[in-house]
Amino acid sequence: MGGTSGIGLGIALELARAGFDVVVVGRNPARGAEAVRRLELAAGGAEDSSFAFARSDLSVVKNVKATCEAFMKQHARLDVLVMTQGRGSMMRWTDNGEGTHANIAVNYLGRVAAAFLLAPLLRASSDPRVLTVLAAGMHKPYVHAADDFAVREHFSFANQADAACSYTDVAFDRFATRFPKISTAHLYPGVVRTNWMIELPLSVRCLAWTLCGACLWTCVKSGDDVGVEFARALLLDEKSGGGGYRYVF
């Protein structure tokens, strides 16, 4: 999920090279078609490989559920689940139609929903693995979580980021505990050149560019490069503890 560009696409390409069938989930059909084309090239035209794009707006959890249910009808097992979708809008709190802000739906709720919904298919694999990429361990807990879990009353860019990221940290720790035979990794990618900030106001993007500087920006790793590194870590045979490995960057 989130595999039409950046880190997600980099991971998908490496999985294709390793011989996996890959379904990329995203909301942009043009990017989806381009991702499938690149996956086919990465696989070297292997006739036994299958690549597809599933269109879904992951800012709405019911769409995530529908996408997972459609996948479950078509497949008997899932070997690897990768979630790199991200959203960084600074809009004021606006309901996405489900009582939550789209940022939190994309960065937290959708990830957790997908992992738990697809757990039966993952458990059908002989070596199931889950990889979620966000700011793992980098945000402090949201202090109003007990009385404002959806960040409706205390919405700010910082608060929604703290909420979504800290909620996700806890959720995947619980997921790994509940499903010890599913190898689960929750990672922090550092500063990466991706499309994550495209929904920020133009003024903010320009300020970030000014502060970082074009020279520094060009030295930052691309999403594709980081995706390849993460995919290689994901595919390591070494495991430690329980039925799988867990690590946080």
Image (cartoon, helix red, strand yellow):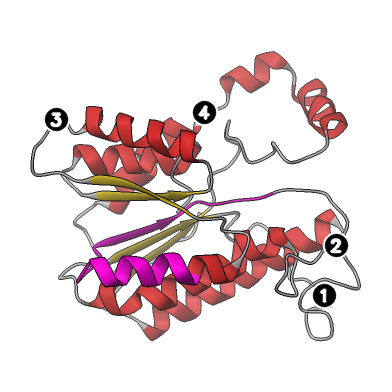
Q: Name the residue under label 2.
A: 93
Task: Name the residue nearer the viewer: 142 or 2.
Answer: 2
Q: Residue 132's x, y, as percent?
A: 46, 58
Residue at 43% in and 39% down? 32
Magenta range is 65-87
Amino acid type, mark 2 = Trp
- Disc 4 to disc 1: CB gap under 8 Å: no
How much space separates mark 3 and mark 2, taking CA atoms? 46 Å
Task: Name the residue nearer the viewer: 35 or 119.
Answer: 35
Q: Mark 3 vs mark 1: which is more N-terminal? A: 3
- Is 80 placed above or below 112 here? above
Residue at 63% in and 41% down? 196
Amino acid type, mark 4 = Lys
Disc 2 secondary structure class: loop
Q: Name the residue under label 4.
A: 221
Q: Mark 3 points at which residue?
A: 45
How much space separates mark 4 and mark 1, taking CA atoms? 33 Å
Residue at 85% in and 27% down? 207
Q: Mark 3 vs mark 4: which is more N-terminal? A: 3
In the rendered structure, the answer to whether residue 129 lies left or right of residue 94 reads left
Q: Name the residue under label 1.
A: 143
Disc 3 secondary structure class: loop
